[in-house]
Amino acid sequence: MANGVDMGSGPPGGGMPPPGGGAAEGYSAFKLEQRGIEHVADADRKMRPAGLFWMWAGGIWNVEFLVYGALIVAFGLTFWQAVFAILLGNVVYVFLGAASLAGPKSGTTTFMVSRAPFGRNGNRAPSLFNWITQVGFEVEGLVIAVLVVVAMFSHEGIHLNDTGKTIAIIIAVLIQFVVPFLGHATITKVLHYLSYVFVVVFAIMACLVLPHVHLSDLHAHGTDSWWLWTTGLVLIVSAGGLGWTENAADYSRYLPADTPPAKTFWAATLGGAIPSILLELLGACAYLVSTSLQSNIYGPGAAAALPTAFASWFFWPFLILALPQLFAINTLDMYSSGVTLQALGLPAKRWVCVVIDTIISGGVTALVIFKGNFYTDLAGFLDYIVVWLGAWFGVYIVDYWLRRGRYEFASLAAKHGGLYWRNGGFNWKALVSLGAGMFAAMMWIDAAFYTPSYSSPLSNWTHGADFSWAFGMIVSAVVYLVLSFRSVPKEVAKHSS
């Protein structure tokens, strides 16, 4: 370390590396990536916008998004309400596109960039929130994978006892570990090619379901409730475009520094939005045509019930293909949770952080499996995470706009001092804005049916509506803009001089 700068995170001798500068490590698939939050060198920026598109598509062509589409109809929405929530909710993938812009500009991960508005020490709070969120999504994918395995055995008349489920959890965790352990280049290549397979599988599922959807039955479900619609919208937003913003720069940082921002934006936005919309619409249709899915959507039998919406012969192909899909999407979360631990301040290599996350997510998966309330817990998790996520994103994206995407990496990496140190490593303007946004979100959230149960004043006043994600984001963005519209450009000017 020199002058408070972590020398493992920057170029030899400290200082700001040139765009795309830093030490190259040799970027190639199926080789252990040594880099964590360190600056990405020009030689290693081999990703292209098309690669970013297919990486996101490969993660999101996924059985989880079928479940989300089925869940929001199960909430009590009519089919057309569900369609409207899916289409509107997935517009927020533009947030993923916007959050991806910082990757090529900074050459580092999302929660390293987040040090610019919050300060190194102030950033520990949103980094911790993000790490917990990433682990939550990892657990979601692992639980569904284990339930798929249980469903496979049940289909053959074999009931897995606790020992069998424990073995299934261990095997799932070990398989899940491999690709995020190897790193970015491996993730990009694997998801790129898997996306082609998943597109074909989607086409088969659509051909099996859509002929059984009759327009006369589309109003047979749901209560046409406005507040239920907003709850469904929250699920789509948090599981989709807003829920991926904290991963964005972790992957786009491998794009060349001179990549046109429009190409970065649209690659991430469309790579996420297209499969999400199509799968959630198909999930909503599947729920309508399967009485078994309707009866089991909130129970451990949902994994076995989902393929009943397609065809009896499709049971085994569906569940066998569901497993690599689940491991694919979890790969994105596990890689990001590892680099988030580093940004939080854990003095460990990226791959060590992946090991830590693997152990923790495996333990929590076991708790969820044996507790047996997974789908209720999932809906509550997706509802509550927007409290911090919307507020953080409001600060993050306004800061990016105020500084026009210009970051000094040496200051982002500095353990002490630097442009973003401010008051002991805290930027109270950003922290106050985050707190204001989170408070606003809690004032307009409806979590009356989750644990912990809570119904906010504004939600009660609007008969159960939930606009927590939007209200929190708007409040935090406005507060941060008011407090920082002069100070952030001054920082940029100081960096440029």
Image (spheres, rainbow, N blue to C red):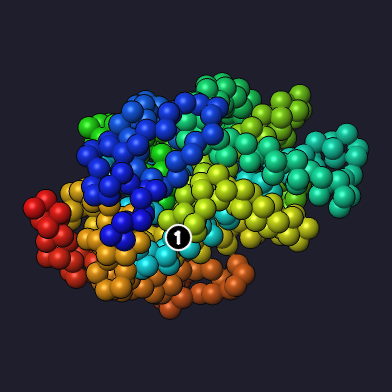
Q: How many marks?
A: 1
Q: Nearer the viewer, residue 68 or 172?
A: 172
- Other residues around mark 1 within 10 Å, as few (<14) / some (14–19) / many (≥20): many
Q: Is residue 365 left or right of residue 16?
A: right
Q: Residue at x 35, y 36 (%)?
A: 23
Q: Is residue 89 left or right of residue 143?
A: left
Q: Nearer the viewer, residue 262 or 315?
A: 262
Image quarter for residue 168?
top right
Q: Residue at x 36, y 73 (%)?
A: 435
Q: Is residue 419 left or right of residue 201?
A: left
Q: Position of residue 209 (x, y in %)?
A: 62, 29
Q: Secondary structure at mark 1?
A: helix
Say which residue label 1 marks: 344
Q: Name the kind of residue labelled 1 in the image.
A: Leu
Image quarter for residue 485?
bottom left
One can see residue 367 in this view: yes
Q: Residue at x 52, y 22 (%)?
A: 193
Q: Is residue 184 left or right of residue 203?
A: left
One can see residue 294 in this view: no
Quarter of the image that includes the N terminus: bottom left
Q: Position of residue 379 (x, y in %)?
A: 58, 57
Q: Nearer the viewer, residue 419 or 317?
A: 419
Q: Position of residue 321 (x, y in %)?
A: 66, 29
Q: Residue at x 75, y 50 (%)?
A: 300
Determine whether 395 is above or below 211 in the image. Answer: below
Determine whether 127 is above or below 174 in the image. Answer: below
